[in-house]
């Protein structure tokens, strides 16, 4: 029996997911100690509950997720508004380096998938589907490429296998990032070079000191929705030029433009959104709600028939990305605190999605301190450059193995 859950009830349940995640993380020391994001804790538990409901009573809940995409846009606007050009300049080299690393890893991820598929007696194309298509690409890339795998390579269950890998990757990407960062920070005794504001949310031990007034909350709401309009304008302009970008990418760019142009044209305005606790709260809430909706709506029962090949592929991908991040990404990115935060983010990015990456970094920085550079570099690599590179690499590898 299918039950349609309306928008209001979907948001209400997502709030319960976050409340439960925060409560469990507070009570279960190991979860907070290893920086497991609260939406991941609550979201996975709720998805298990809903999956059990399906297996026992045959009840399937279909959530209204229209607002989820809007929350993602709002979240990326808050990241853009917190980003100064001076931080972008500092992160310029890191952005290029991480991009090169990420593009190289797309090949490693695909060869890992191909290797595991061969061990299971499956075709190389199945390995590519269980590589960068579903993991680095996520659900969107999987849905876009599944018809090609089905029609051109005879994979009748391409959609199911790809979605299953993307689903498990989304969860595991939010699980391994925090422990990796904790290991690196403790192993190398890392701390932020200077006291930096937390980009999303607030430090765990500073929560009771935060003051949010009516005026700064109202300003935050106004600026966010004004930026949405600028982002939509940028999207329309780019579309008119024959290009296509996701709405959240242009929203990020719009936020960066606004936060850096206002001080130039309105010099008397006290403009410091990167220090705004209202904006940090909006970031935390929008990201938390987005992830809560994404994880609680996972249909775990769709994974049962694919458990064998899925388990082998996922296990290999998790091991490879963990080693890659610890042994290569962290070292090349500088072996400092920012590198540790970016490592947590990249682990989430390589297995799940950009929001997962940011959730990992948020959990780490709430505990150890801010890293503005990480919140610029990782989202730009994950939200824009990696998708373009991934599409080209997928097309190339499919031509090789066709």
Image (cartoon, grey):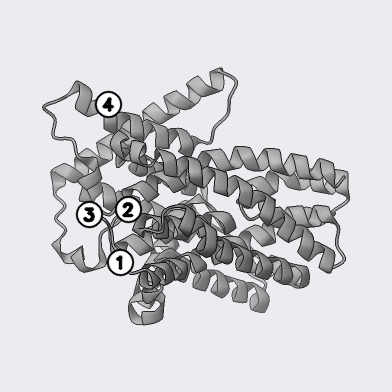
| Distance of label 3 from label 2 (alpha carbons) | 9 Å
The disc label shown at residue 371, or none: 2
Disc 1 to disc 2: CB gap under 8 Å: no
What residue is rendered at 35% in x and 34% in y? Answer: 256
In this image, 394 relative to 376: left or right? Answer: right
Q: Nearer the viewer, mark 1 or mark 2?
A: 2
Q: Earlier in the sequence, mark 3 or mark 2?
A: 3
Q: Secondary structure at mark 4?
A: helix
Q: Quadrant of the C terminus?
A: top right
| Distance of label 1 from label 3 (alpha carbons) | 15 Å
Q: Nearer the viewer, mark 3 or mark 2?
A: 3
Q: Is residue 265 above or below residue 358?
A: above
| Distance of label 4 from label 1 (alpha carbons) | 32 Å
What residue is rendered at 60% in x and 41% in y? Answer: 387
Give the residue number, with chain letter if any, for mark 3.
Answer: 194
Q: Earlier in the sequence, mark 1 or mark 3?
A: 3
Q: Quadrant of the N terminus?
A: bottom right
What residue is rendered at 11% in x and 27% in y? Answer: 268
Q: Secondary structure at mark 3?
A: loop
| Mark 3 Cα shell of 10 Å, populated few (<14), some (14-19), many (≥20) | few
Q: Is residue 114 above or below residue 80?
A: below
| Mark 4 Cα shell of 10 Å, populated few (<14), some (14-19), many (≥20) | few
Q: Position of residue 41 (x, y in %)?
A: 45, 71
Give the residue number, with chain letter if any, for mark 4.
Answer: 261
Give the residue number, with chain letter if any, for mark 1.
Answer: 367
Q: Position of residue 40 (x, y in %)?
A: 47, 66
Can residue 124 be seen here? The reply is: yes
In this image, 271 relative to 160: left or right? Answer: left
């Amino acid at each position: 029996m299918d039950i349609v859950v309306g928008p209001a009830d979907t948001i209400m349940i997502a709030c319960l997911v976050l409340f439960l995640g925060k409560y469990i993380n507070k009570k279960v020391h190991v979860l907070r100690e290893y920086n497991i994001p609260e939406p991941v804790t609550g979201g996975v538990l709720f998805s298990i509950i809903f999956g059990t409901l399906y297996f026992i009573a045959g009840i399937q809940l279909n959530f209204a997720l229209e607002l989820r995409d809007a929350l993602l846009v709002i979240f990326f606007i808050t990241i853009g508004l917190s980003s100064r050009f001076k931080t972008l300049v500092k992160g310029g080299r890191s952005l290029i380096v991480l991009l090169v690393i990420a593009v190289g890893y797309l090949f490693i991820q695909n060869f890992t998938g191909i290797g595991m598929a061969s061990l299971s007696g499956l075709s190389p194309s199945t390995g590519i589907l269980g590589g960068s298509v579903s993991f680095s690409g996520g659900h969107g890339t999987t849905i876009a490429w599944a018809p090609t795998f089905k029609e051109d390579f005879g994979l009748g269950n391409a959609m199911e296998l790809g979605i299953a890998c993307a689903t498990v990757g989304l969860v595991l990407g939010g699980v391994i990032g925090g422990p990796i960062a904790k290991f690196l920070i403790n192993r190398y005794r890392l701390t932020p070079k200077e006291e930096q504001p937390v980009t999303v949310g607030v430090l765990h031990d500073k929560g009771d000191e935060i003051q949010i007034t009516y005026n700064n909350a109202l300003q935050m709401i106004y600026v966010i929705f004004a930026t949405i309009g600028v982002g939509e304008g940028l999207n329309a302009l780019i579309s008119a030029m024959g290009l296509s970008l996701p709405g959240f990418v242009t929203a990020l760019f719009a936020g960066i433009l606004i936060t850096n142009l206002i001080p130039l044209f309105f010099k008397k305005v006290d403009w410091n959104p990167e220090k705004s606790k209202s904006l940090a709260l909006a970031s935390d809430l929008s990201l938390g709600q987005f992830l809560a909706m994404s994880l609680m709506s996972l249909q775990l029962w769709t994974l049962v028939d694919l458990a064998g090949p899925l388990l082998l592929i996922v296990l290999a991908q998790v091991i490879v990305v963990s080693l890659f991040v610890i042994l290569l990404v962290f070292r090349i990115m500088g072996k400092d605190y920012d590198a540790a935060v970016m490592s947590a983010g990249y682990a989430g990015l390589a297995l799940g999605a950009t929001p997962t990456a940011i959730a990992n970094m948020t959990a780490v920085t709430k505990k150890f301190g801010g890293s503005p550079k990480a919140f610029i570099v990782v989202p730009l690599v994950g939200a824009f450059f990696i998708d373009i590179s991934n599409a080209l690499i997928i097309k190339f590898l499919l031509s090789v193995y066709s």
